[in-house]
Image (cartoon, grey):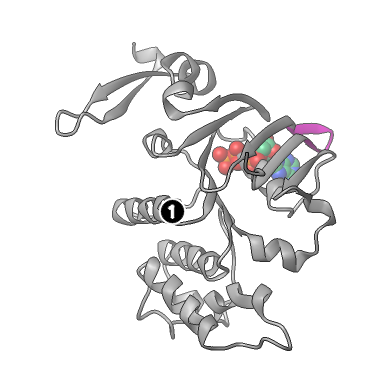
Amino acid sequence: MNVPILQARHLTRSIRGRAVVRDVSFELHPGENLGLIGPNGSGKSSLLRLLAGLQRPDSGEVMLKGDRLSRLPRRQIARTLAFVAQSQEASERLTVRQSVALGRTPWLTVLSPWGPADEAAVQKALSAVGLQGFEGRDWESLSGGERQRAHIARALAQEPELMILDEPSNHLDIHHQMAVLDLIAGLDVTTILAVHDLNHAMRCDRIVCLLQGQLVALGTPQDVLTPQLLREVFQIHARQLTDPRDGQLIWRFDSLEKV
Ligand SMILES: Nc1ncnc2c1ncn2[C@@H]1O[C@H](COP(=O)(O)OP(=O)(O)OP(=O)(O)O)[C@@H](O)[C@H]1O
């Protein structure tokens, strides 16, 4: 059995005396694409920040490839995992290329300075998110969606084994939502991503559902996304319809008051 790439072990974190993540445990295996769902304020971003090592849990432990995350050097963590925050700022003075090039930082040393492989990684990342030609643009001139794609490009340039993404399709138009989700699904890296659109969550290998900081369901989309769970967690009435074109299941939602 493979060592899990990431393990959450009984993670708990409180903010101002209120637990926002409560005793959350699960494992992520190499190559998996795990979706994190839950209502606003259910603790998704808080959990992702714990998993990325940006915040420490009050109790519990994150294990990265079998090692305690809290004991690993920053550079080693950054060579393994990349985090794309929900709304992330970058210095306005940077160009897009410079900003994406920051993703290479964990790999640069005195003995291994910037070289052709680093340049190639930056170009590959820019092209993966459709930002070729934007290299020389100032960061501040980008639209919200272009910034989001540039953040993803920086994480890709890091060439991590694991990507942790907080609502990566936030700010994106429908075309770029699909493009980014297809890109993430097609990456040869393990991913964990917070998603609001449950039809997007259907594309994940497995789903973790949070409610008030607690893990209330974990399993395949078919197992987790049931009308009963969606009613209890999101207070909606959900029905699955079949697309006659290819037989794929899609969700239709109504407020409980309407049905
Ligand atoms: N710095 C803070 N101070 C006080 N409360 C906070 C702080 N950060 C987060 N919280 C609270 O923690 C809870 C979990 O927040 P979190 O952002 O993790 O939820 P989320 O599931 O990502 O929400 P959303 O879907 O709205 O992005 C919320 O009730 C939020 O108000």
Determine the main secondary structure of the stretch shown in magenta.
strand
Q: Which residue is mark 1?
A: 184
Residue 21, position as x, y percentages in the image:
72, 34
- SS class of the residue under badge 1? helix
Residue 42, position as x, y percentages in the image:
62, 32
From the viewer's side, name the closer residue of 124 and 36.
124
Give the residue displayed 55% in from the left and 65% down from the top.
155
Task: Report the side of 116 relative to 236 (left or right).
Answer: right
Give the residue displayed 52% in from the left and 82% down from the top.
117
Count of numbered marks: 1
Residue 32, position as x, y percentages in the image:
51, 44
Name which residue type carries label 1.
Ile
Mark 1 packing: few (<14 Cα in 10 Å), some, or many (20+)? many
Give the residue displayed 73% in from the left and 55% down from the top.
54
Residue 10, position as x, y percentages in the image:
77, 32
Give the residue displayed 42% in from the left and 74% down from the top.
124
Quadrant assignment for the C terminus = top left
Residue 50 on the magenta segment: no
Task: Report the side of 5 relative to 63 (left or right).
Answer: left
Indicate whether 118 appears above or below 201. below
Is residue 212 visible in the rendered image? The answer is no
Spot the residue most to the front. Answer: 1
- Magenta range is 11-21
Indicate whether 217 appears above or below 143. above
